[in-house]
Image (cartoon, rainbow, N blue to C red):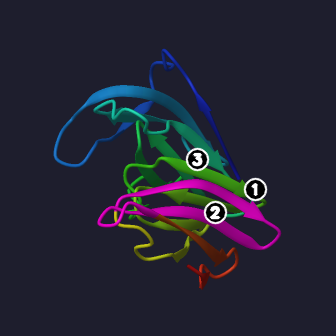
Amino acid sequence: DYIVERAWPPPSGLDVVEFDIPGAMGTVSFQAVVRPSGRESWIASFRTDNYEGGLTFIETWDSGPMVLACAGGYPHFFSAENPDSRLDLAAYPVLHRLRRDDLVILGDFTTLIAIDGHGLVWESGRLASDELTSLEIRKDIVEVKGNDASTGGWTKFALSLETGELLTG
């Protein structure tokens, strides 16, 4: 069990854990207080280089110890109980986010991934060469349109929500 809440300015006296962007420090986008049950609270400080169009959000789960935070398109997936326990996510920059129950679907320009409170559930592999758009969940199907930069054409893809298996496209 844990609680994560944005805090600006954050309370003093808590340890701060930095979540940087790859290859640079960036600027602080937001901070959150992480309160794991039975453990010391700590502050998560998320940095970004302000990628235009990148999403900023926090996702938590009732089951599983993991927290998903995204600062300006840079996703961070970590344990509330141990911030050193992190999982690198393939999706960057995060431009799309959908949630169905305990499953969160993230998309960048070319791929989709699905995660839950325990970790990575599936990764689609490269769907488009340039851009994904119109991400939707219909029943147990994830639908997305992908652009092929070489032809300028659009393809509609359908994937299994449970497994990420490509059904059409």
Q: Which residue is mark 2?
A: 117
Residue type at numbered disc 1? Asp
Q: Which residue is mark 1?
A: 62
| Between discs 3 and 1, the one toward the N terminus | 3
| Residue 69 x/y as whole percent | 51, 45
Q: Which residue is mark 3?
A: 39
> Residue 23 location in percent, x, y?
16, 47
Locate the C terminus by quadrant.
bottom right
Q: Residue drawn at (40%, 73%), measured in percent from left and top?
A: 126
Circle 3 sits in a helix, a strand or a loop, which is it? loop
Element carrying mark 1: loop
**Residue 41 visible to an observer of this rendering:** no
Q: Please, is residue 62 above or below residue 12 in the view?
A: below
Residue in front for this viewpoint, 149 or 58: 149
Residue 102 location (% of width, % of height): 73, 62
Please tell me which residue is depicted at 60% across the width and 79% down the height of the picture.
Answer: 164
Magenta region? 130-153
**Amino acid type for the residue under numbered disc 3:** Arg
Decide: marks 1, 2 in contact (CB < 8 A)? yes
Q: How many marks?
A: 3
* Distance from the alpha carbon under mark 1 to that under mark 2: 8 Å
N-terminal label among 2 and 3 = 3
Q: Amino acid at mark 2?
A: Gly
Q: Is residue 78 left or right of residue 134?
A: left
Front one among 22 and 50: 50
Name the image quarter holding residue 156. Answer: bottom right
